[in-house]
Amino acid sequence: TWSAAAAASPCPSRRPWTGSGGARGGSTAPLARPRRTTCSGASTTRTWRACWATSSVRSSSCSSPSACGPTRWRSCGGRSASSAWTRACAWTPRRTSWGGTTPPRCPGGWRRGCASCTRRTTTASASGSATSCASGTTARRAPAAAAPAAKAGEPLLAQTRWRRGRDRVSEVLREGAGAMGQRRTVKGWVRTMRAADKKRLLFVKLNDGSCLPDLQVVAERGRTEGFEALEGSGGVGASVSVTGVVQASSGKEQEVELSAEGVEVIGPVYGGDGGAVGAKNYPLAKKKHTAEHLRGVAHLRARTLTYSAAVRVRHAMAMATHDFFHERGFYYVHTPLITAADCEGAGEQFAVTTLLGDKARTADVPATPAGAVDYARDFFGKRACLTVSGQLNVETHACALSDCYTFGPTFRAEVSHTSRHLAEFWMIEPEICFAGLEEDMALAEDYLRYCVAYALRNCPHELKFFEDRAEAEGGEAAGLRARLENVRDSEFVRISYSKCVQLCQDAARDGAVVFERVPQWGDDLGSEHERYVCEKVYGCPTIVYDYPKGIKAWYMRLNDDDATVGAMDVLVPGIGELMGGSVREERLDVLERRCIESGVDPASMSWYMDLRRYGSVPHAGFGLGFERLVMYVTGISNIRDVIPFPRTPGQCDF
């Protein structure tokens, strides 16, 4: 707690105490409120960190914004936790974002680092830029100097220029009671709107997509500027900007609400008869819609609770993927979408050609003497297709950079209408060099557990929403979080393909389970067999390895028994196979023989063979369909509902 005695005493790290101006070496005058301050620790640390709290119960060591609360974090050395003072200026005296100037208090309320006051203007000149507000006060900004190189843990940019100019709904709800009494501006789309007290009040649920919960806005006729415009906006689906004061909510669903002082209708809903304002014909009017209906309005379904939650989880899984591999020293490689190679050898590829223009006729397609399409006269001089996998290409970089991964769209022309197949989907495919099957299985296990843990930590509202909805409807996501926690906390079981087949045969013989088809050695395992093993036998994720060579791809390493290959599949409860991988065949003679056996011309893959001719090394990798990962984490049963614009047979709109 600040006192004259404390001001006179030396700082433990032999640096001046934070003064009332908030800058190092500032005044030692007492502050208007008792506030607790601390140096950042070691004397070699330049950045002062202070928790400007209303009492001494706050932590005396504020090493992160969360330690002090989102609006009371202050860093007194010219830097802050998120660079340009984005979390400062919660109390007076207010501080600008460029290193120490303390202008008088702005009557309009300087907020979020003094960068988004609606009454502020900025002018620039050769000598710097000046910022002023309606009070007439001016703060001078000096010309930018060359910034020193950022140290580890510090922001890369000491100053940033971009600001949202609004508060996100997620921020207001996260701050909760800490934001009460503050004036905020939020912008978003109306989820619901209802009138009360003889239309004197409007209760609006507003969402900007930043989180699952809505922010309740209360507008009052005669007090809220723009009330009539809001009332005539068409309601559900309209986009609005609301400025008001955060206050405690009397409702049970939220802690705080926004008491609107002013409303601006940005975009009304023209869904009435004859294109008039109204929500009558708005495709997402307030009622429950089927997933099939929402796929038909895929350009609007991101505004729904279910799909917006799926998008946020999808984003989290993409971030988790990049974080996981970056933390382990992998390099992200962009592999081509157009290729002349067929990674899987199945031939289910989309052809890429310029021979068929908008007005092309069958007679215009060049043909060989044998009557086949003459691709030599096509754009690439040969038959080219959209890739079904980036694996073969990423191997080229792994065999030089050691550990790489690719994460991008892939395509498969398989005529399938099931809930698990798409014509366009994304694949995650890492590749590790100087490694075998054990390392490959360990990497796959760690990656899946990391993604699940990331979702549990960063998407709690979304996972609870999916679980609650499934339990109410009897869907597959019932018990979702417990299932994910089981994956996160379990050590994956590892069994051979032969043992897996034996377990299924024994269970079928003993009457413990009834399969549609009892597997025999050499058969590809079905979902019923995979789920039985990982759900009933082991009750946790299971890795099956050493598959028969006849059911796996030509590039997988042949085992010494000449009957199996070093391949593996990861099976998870609730879905079965989720990811698959293998050791790659690094022996040139064996690889050429396997190509011929599988009907692949080794000459067409000469570049791939070169990796074995020039410094071949053992390497391995796996592939995971990104949409299937999102399905597993969310419990959504149809793959078409976890991708923005699903491409399936007969469906290529938007």
Image (tube, rainbow, N blue to C red):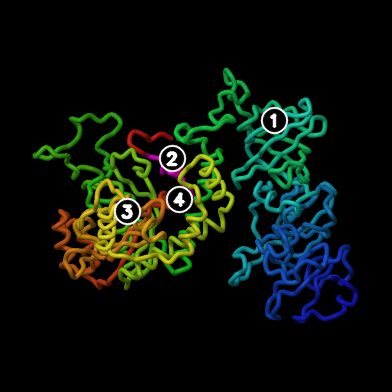
Label 3 belongs to which residue? 512
- In the rendered image, the quadrant that contains the C terminus is top left
Instruction: Report the front residue among 616 and 581.
Output: 581
Label 4 belongs to which residue? 630
Among numbered discs 1 and 3, the one appearing first in the sequence: 1
Among numbered discs 2 and 3, the one appearing first in the sequence: 3
Where's residue 570, x and y in %? 36, 59
Among numbered discs 1 and 4, the one appearing first in the sequence: 1
Q: Which mark is residue 568?
A: none
- In the rendered image, the quadrant that contains the N terminus is bottom right
Q: Secondary structure at mark 2?
A: loop
The 10 Å Cα crowd at callout 1, few under 14, some 14 to 19, many 20 or more, is few
Instruction: Report the front residue among 571 and 355.
Output: 571
Where's residue 81, x and y in %? 67, 64
The 10 Å Cα crowd at callout 4, few under 14, some 14 to 19, many 20 or more, is many
**Label 2 is placed on what type of residue?**
Phe
**Label 1 is placed on what type of residue?**
Arg
Where's residue 603, x and y in %? 16, 58
Q: Secondary structure at mark 1?
A: strand
Q: Is residue 323 magenta?
A: no
Q: Identify the residue shown where x is 66% and y is 41%.
A: 187
Q: Which residues are magenta?
A: 631-647
Q: Which mark is residue 194?
A: 1
Q: Is disc 4 in contact with disc 2, using a CB cutoff of under 8 Å?
A: no
The 10 Å Cα crowd at callout 2, few under 14, some 14 to 19, many 20 or more, is some
